[in-house]
Amino acid sequence: MTKQKNRSIHIDKQINTIFSKDYQIILKEIEDSIDNILINKEGQEIILEKIVKRASSSKNNPQIIDGLIYQKIMETRNSYIKEQVIKKLPNGIINLKKFSYINYTELHNLLLNKNFKEADKLTQTYLCKLVELKTNSKKNWLYFTDIQFIPKQDLFTLDLLWKIYSKGKFGFSIQKKIWIKSNKKWDKLWEKICWLKKGVMKRYPQEFSWTLDAPEGHLPLFNQLRGTQTLSYLFDSIEW
């Protein structure tokens, strides 16, 4: 067996091992393993084939590991591999269904490029727009009575986009998980996701963090200055 064949088999096993685990959040050691695989063209081609196959499967249930790998391929200097991933996955790894009124491609691209501040603004706009479409009433922010008008499929899609392009750190479902672990104590949630500064809610936007260095659950923001009832109703809508 040739040295190249042995190397390909080794890389294939490495990738299969990475994909075999169910990640809640991506640790540095896993990211380092992916970076090592993507160093050479051979590794890039094998891992590209894997995520294309996973994204094309009938289940199409993308995980945060798929999002990280897709991001890293798009960030590589190898223009050929980037062209191939764009050709084979023109809409990314998520099957963004053709919703009747909202196209989430812009949000996808902002999160893919780690432009979290603009992605946060757009997420709030989308949520208001979803309610407007149901109620025919203009919304600049949401009340708890509005949450019932947000389709669960749309909420799931927004949450999934945030999760898979943040290594599992951000998303409404992440915030809900931390809230539950905090015995549903809001002050504890604010502290853990770092929305407080010296016991007072931070000022938007300058005192919030807009990078992956932010603590788990820090983003997206949601009616962050308008009490807890609306967020509580949003959490209740999350069933995944």
Image (cartoon, grey):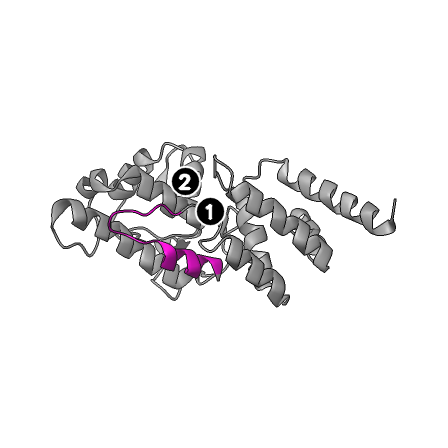
Mark number, residue 125 = none
Quadrant in the picture for the N terminus:
top right
Residue 29 in percent (x, y) is at 68, 48
3 or 76, nearer to the observer? 3
The answer to whether the residue labelled 1 contacts the one labelled 2, judged by CB atoms less than 8 Å apart, is: yes
Would residue 26 be found to the left or right of residue 99 on screen?
right
Residue 111 in magenta stretch: yes
Q: Residue at x 17, y 54 (%)?
A: 139
Residue 195 in percent (x, y) is at 40, 53
Q: Residue at x 77, y 47 (%)?
A: 8
Question: Which secondary structure lies at badge 1?
Answer: helix
Question: Which secondary structure lies at badge 2?
Answer: helix
Can residue 65 be spotted in the picture? no
Region in magenta: 96-112
Badge 1, how many Cα within 10 Å: few under 14, some, many 20+? Answer: many
Q: Which residue is mark 1?
A: 163
Residue 88 in percent (x, y) is at 52, 53
Residue 148 in percent (x, y) is at 21, 38
Mark 1 or 2, nearer chain start: 1
Quadrant in the picture for the C terminus:
top left
Can residue 194 be spotted in the picture? yes
User: Given the image, on which type of amino acid does mark 1 rest?
Assistant: Lys
Q: Which residue is mark 2?
A: 173
User: Given the image, on which type of amino acid does mark 2 rest?
Assistant: Ser
Residue 220 in magenta stretch: no
Would residue 13 be found to the left or right of residue 51 on screen?
right
